[in-house]
Image (cartoon, coloured by chain):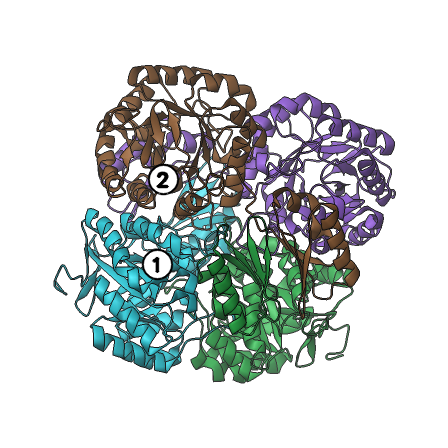
Chain colours: A purple, B brown, C green, D cyan
Amino acid sequence: MMVIMQQGATEEQIRHVMERLEAAGVKPHPSRGEFVTVIGAIGDDRELVASLALEAEPGVEKVVPILKPYKLVSTDFRGGTDVVVEVAGRKVGNGSFGLIAGPCAVETREQTLTAAHAAKDAGASMLRGGAYKPRTSPYAFQGLGAPGLDILREAREETGLPIVTELMNLRQLDDVLDVADVVQIGARNVQNFDLLREVGQAGVPVLLKRGMATTIEEWLLSAEYVAREGNPNVILCERGIRTFEPATRATLDISAVPVTKSLSSLPVIVDPSHAAGKRDYILPMARAAVAAGADGLIVEIHPAPEHALCDGPQALHTETFDEWVADIRRIVDVMGKVIAGDGSVPVGA
Amino acid sequence: MMVIMQQGATEEQIRHVMERLEAAGVKPHPSRGEFVTVIGAIGDDRELVASLALEAEPGVEKVVPILKPYKLVSTDFRGGTDVVVEVAGRKVGNGSFGLIAGPCAVETREQTLTAAHAAKDAGASMLRGGAYKPRTSPYAFQGLGAPGLDILREAREETGLPIVTELMNLRQLDDVLDVADVVQIGARNVQNFDLLREVGQAGVPVLLKRGMATTIEEWLLSAEYVAREGNPNVILCERGIRTFEPATRATLDISAVPVTKSLSSLPVIVDPSHAAGKRDYILPMARAAVAAGADGLIVEIHPAPEHALCDGPQALHTETFDEWVADIRRIVDVMGKVIAGDGSVPVGA
Amino acid sequence: MMVIMQQGATEEQIRHVMERLEAAGVKPHPSRGEFVTVIGAIGDDRELVASLALEAEPGVEKVVPILKPYKLVSTDFRGGTDVVVEVAGRKVGNGSFGLIAGPCAVETREQTLTAAHAAKDAGASMLRGGAYKPRTSPYAFQGLGAPGLDILREAREETGLPIVTELMNLRQLDDVLDVADVVQIGARNVQNFDLLREVGQAGVPVLLKRGMATTIEEWLLSAEYVAREGNPNVILCERGIRTFEPATRATLDISAVPVTKSLSSLPVIVDPSHAAGKRDYILPMARAAVAAGADGLIVEIHPAPEHALCDGPQALHTETFDEWVADIRRIVDVMGKVIAGDGSVPVGA
Amino acid sequence: MMVIMQQGATEEQIRHVMERLEAAGVKPHPSRGEFVTVIGAIGDDRELVASLALEAEPGVEKVVPILKPYKLVSTDFRGGTDVVVEVAGRKVGNGSFGLIAGPCAVETREQTLTAAHAAKDAGASMLRGGAYKPRTSPYAFQGLGAPGLDILREAREETGLPIVTELMNLRQLDDVLDVADVVQIGARNVQNFDLLREVGQAGVPVLLKRGMATTIEEWLLSAEYVAREGNPNVILCERGIRTFEPATRATLDISAVPVTKSLSSLPVIVDPSHAAGKRDYILPMARAAVAAGADGLIVEIHPAPEHALCDGPQALHTETFDEWVADIRRIVDVMGKVIAGDGSVPVGA
């Protein structure tokens, strides 16, 4: 780390900071300029920066960390090798494109099975669907709960598609793990650290949505919580951040795709549905995500969006979903990728 | 609600929206303008707006709700009467000012007791301290856990100050309830709806921090989750929102104080420490919070901030905390309020 | 507009609002609900909403405009026909893709001519380059001024590429108009309304960058300032908005492409360079922009980015720019568009 | 500056960066760590950081400036002495509180004179009023222009209050200078650098509003543009920044008051009217601003806000403005300040 002292910091303050660095086992290198002194202390400073809290010392202007604060999920750690998350034979990452589709919420057996078949027929890699729904208003539909998980189990049996479903709290852990091939951690839980630790210990593939106000660095630190329990199978999911612009539900941070791919070895997919909030914008935003280098997409489909109990305005129609996928596939092709589990390649190839 | 149709919406689309409103038991009133038709449907639309999802219907431009989406926590519901939250004889709200102070994290018995006595001596109303700490980095100190709760219990016995401490997940619920006089729900859990429901059922006073990207409306809906379980004792806590400005850790939304007080009957306090992130800014920001009409403050104090395991740069020194409180009290006086539990008035008066 | 009265608004307040609407020549339609009265007044409310200021009246909760506040630049006004901006035979819009490249700032004759030839050879449609540079710091290079314009004139003579250059203030107007084929209005001047009016009167094609904190609606209103002077030739340019995310210089709002195209008839291009701030991210972000449906791109190229006087870290190398364009062209092809002025089609075709 | 090299940067890349620093006349100090090399180059790096553009060099991770990028407006430059801006005998800064009131826009002679007298009678220090109005919509009232300036001149003659009025473009410069005692640069022009230079040269006191997306550092750099022309008389004005929160027109960044006062020697005032956007919130926000340490306030007053041509919902009523000022004065007193030009002290005292 570099400790930048204030203009006018005293010799005693400088000496005190150096002593604290030395006491922590780090060798400090002071550089004395005309106006300001900077104390360098180079090494693995991930834990030191946090634990020393030198910014609280008198005379310190600021502390600049040198190393990224995450380690296991960084590109440096794996020497440039990408993590490929494999789910029931479908791979996400390194040229294999994960296309995840399904209803926002599991509402009925019929609605879910219709969506599952539409996803399957259009060539999707996995089925999404929420049995537990985090809703801003207590007056909105909160999900079917456990019976919803049973419907998802049946949909997997019928279609063979792996299931992506959300875990909201630790008490649901066993039930969700019993059905989920991929456990989704939603945007509101991206810093629910206890949840992250437990899905890390469970070893199940995790789809980790970025929070609405989470920086990319914080998001990768949340992934590090999972990885640190021995579970490297994290799929990052950009889903839009909160900004001043009201025209969309969230602002899709498309640059998060190349940024996370340059900083981290994890695959990154994009959820255009929640960012757009409006059906018409989803196709262009999905195309953009693929072109930006995303390793997959997660989209919402529904047999009758205008009667959906959750997020109807942003759901694609199941009956035309195959055309939608055909459109997206043109960009997937240009990017030299293949949709995992797609009819055109054997599953698990 | 008002359903604004698109320019060019067909008669059939308009009729269809009206039929859906009628089927839901609401009488629609269409207004046909030169360019656009608007369909009004007035009544308690809290559940209808969400459940009908008319924005997903063809021809609909947008749906404008008329009523506020929350009810129990609104000023209208209580006819202008303020909720006063009473904690072991200390009141927060309606002229009684809650001053909560203590360390960010419980680190040691000595550190916590020193802070508790400093809080008590300076005239604080309650003691804060975290046994479970949500930390962005897995490499940072995560709190003492259960032993930390024991230290808090001892601090209460020694000083008589009620305890405010954070609950992070459902599994800690019983342990935390056993010690906490007020359960703090942190910024990262403001939309952890299962947690909100359970503290609602527990009936304990709740300090509900605003999330970093939570609108005031969403924050009040989170409070509504608690209130709906029969627990009206929610203290709202503004702690800064995330913006583009890097000079402070978060941007304290001072206008949230008058805004929430005009929309809701709940007391609102301010946490200047987390917003500022830097000791020097906390006094002016705390003064501002009091002047804006806050019903209280929550601040971090530490006997040795430069050795704190958490948030040292923003901790006030315990040894000069009494001067700090004396400064704040001048503005509390001008606002015609009294610090709850302050030496100047008998506790519970 | 719909005027939503407060709960508890008096009959007199309701009557007063209706009288003001009638006095303004609009027929009010009140709808009285159980809790709230809404007064509808349908018609062209663009000027009325602003001029009546009914939100300042006692008893009024809020005013909801029905029509979009802009008119000439809206899709409705042109009945779905797109504006195609033609610049010296190059078209931008309706399938014709404008690729604009060049240095951030004109620094020297040699640097600019090298960049101009690289742009031309790679198949770009126009040359960009700033003679007047808005710089955050007074200590940074401020542009060559008038001599820079002469260099641009020479570059156009040598390469035949039309010139896009920025206008910063009214005093430079004649000089800039003398050289510019397209006048760029920078992000910081998007609400410099006098400047907008004058380039509107000049009738020259305008490249209007979105401001860092400008909503799409405000941006279209700025375009309306130009159009209202009789000049419909406005190319919108998304260049990133300011958010909390520090990993990029600005957050490219990719959804602004489909959103503006659905609201407005104007062509929309994207500047990935200023949003990215870092060379490595520009290709994926440019690909994404094309896939999202942009009508063009504007990018910075430099023969020696590490010696650039302005924005070097985000400049592409001139010597490999042809490969960069070849990559982008693959997505342009998939989108069924053609780069204007590209070797593959005659200029002006 | 500190140049942090990438992990894996080559010896040649490190040497090249050192050579470039040496060529610029700076002595580089490399520190080689286990993972990363950092090259320190300490001295006055304001111009170097910008001109060297080392972030564009291969192998460079990032460049961390050591010194603040502004100089003349910094606290360091003046050794802790505050700038006190004196306007016709009224001082702003160092304990003298500038209370500026008046209509948003000059609409009529009568409206302006009524407001001027109300301001005067309530004890305000100066009169504000816009003759040229920047309006988001071209369909909104744009100000009276030159005749508005004449009305302001008359108001000054009648009341003796100095005039604060906005300058929008260079062509209005002479006319505005002829009337204005303080030239206001609006939020949209905070980075209109040509305008800043010219008001710098004119030597007139400047009220510089912060832009809606301007960081504090950028705002101080805009002030530096003025100061660099030899004009230190800049009053900073915080007026709210743009965030995701829709409940107020802008989010008043109250912490900007202590932050700018710690970084800069300039006085800082607050505009609660534009941030609030709603009359009811202005008093609490104004109180907060005073308590946070602001050197003044600027508020909008109108004899009939519901008929105002601009920003009526946020205007205070002239007839009760004296009570409003009396309320604010209680906090001004606690802060140990005196309203400049107030009846209680002789002007210019």
Determine the CA span between mark 1 and mark 2.
Answer: 21 Å
- B114 to A116, vertically: above or below: above
Residue D24: percent from the left, percent from the top?
38, 59
Asked if D58 appears above or below C217 in the picture, the reply is above
User: In the drawing, what numbered circle is on residue B272?
Assistant: 2
Q: Exactly how many numbered labels are in the figure?
A: 2
On screen, residue A82 above or below B124: below
Question: Badge 1 local density, few (<14 within 10 Å), some, or many (20+)?
Answer: many
Q: A197 or A46: which is nearer to us?
A: A197
Task: Work out which residue is located at the far front of the displayed protein and give it.
Answer: C11
Q: Amino acid at mark 2?
A: Pro
Q: Is residue D306 left or right of residue D258?
A: right
> Which residue is located at x 51 percent, y 35 percent?
B223
Q: Is residue A230 something that shows in the picture? A: no
The location of residue A47, given as percent across then percent down, is: 45, 30
What residue did someone put label 1 on?
D271
Q: Quadrant of residue B260?
A: top left
SS under mark 2: helix
Question: Local crowd at mark 2 within 10 Å, few (<14), some, or many (≥20)?
Answer: many
Q: Residue at x 25, y 72 (%)?
A: D181
Residue A349 coordinates in the image, percent (x, y)? 83, 36
Give the vertical position of B165 relative to C2 (above or below).
above
What chain does badge 2 belong to?
A: B
